[in-house]
Amino acid sequence: MTISQKTTLAKPNELPKKWFHVDASDQILGRMASDIAMVLMGKHRPTYTPHVDTGDFVVVTNAEKVVMTGRKLEHRHYAWYTGYTGQKMESYQDRQQRKPEDLVIHAVRRMLPKNKLARQMLSKLKVYAGPEHPHQAQQVEDLEIGKKAS
């Protein structure tokens, strides 16, 4: 006797999107970013489908209070090309003082797949430097970051 099992594939706009809130105060940047990337991709759901955006929205507050282990704030640098000779470089510490939201956005972006779908997933990430955000109307739920389910 054979049992036929069917693999279900999610369709776009089939699943309702939830909104989650993450407080970045005293969170380690990389660990927090990997958990946020999982929610944006939809890997926290049993209906995860790689070619469909099944993820949820994530609102991150207190991005200015995120921490990094060791001396990465002084030793790691962002580098970019401006079109002129040479590269512009800026340490993570300088970037955190100037644009604290960029640290979280870049960390999450680099943990998403490198394709067009990732750009769509990244648009569901909302990052704010302070404790306030304008998304109370979406019934934002708190998301436990860094806690592994046992």
Image: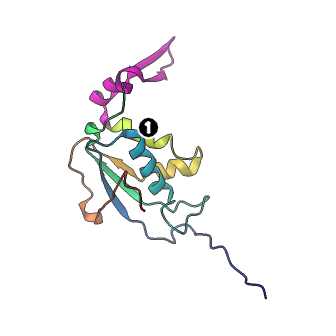
Q: Nearer the viewer, residue 137 or 147?
A: 147
| Residue 96 is a magenta residue | yes
Q: Which residue is found at the position 55% from the left and 64% from the top?
A: 48
Q: Nearer the viewer, residue 135 or 149?
A: 149
Q: Which residue is found at the position 31% from the left and 32% from the top?
A: 99
Q: Is residue 120 left or right of residue 9?
A: left
Q: Secondary structure at mark 1?
A: helix
Residue 87 makes an appearance in the image: yes
Residue 46: x and y in percent read 53, 68
For the N terminus, give its image quadrant: bottom right
| Residue 39 is a magenta residue | no
Q: Is residue 127 left or right of residue 117?
A: left
Which region is colored magenta? 71-100
Residue 18: x and y in percent read 38, 65
Q: How is the image coloured?
A: rainbow
Q: Mark 1 highlights which residue?
A: 106
- The residue type indicated by label 1 comes to His
For the C terminus, give its image quadrant: bottom left
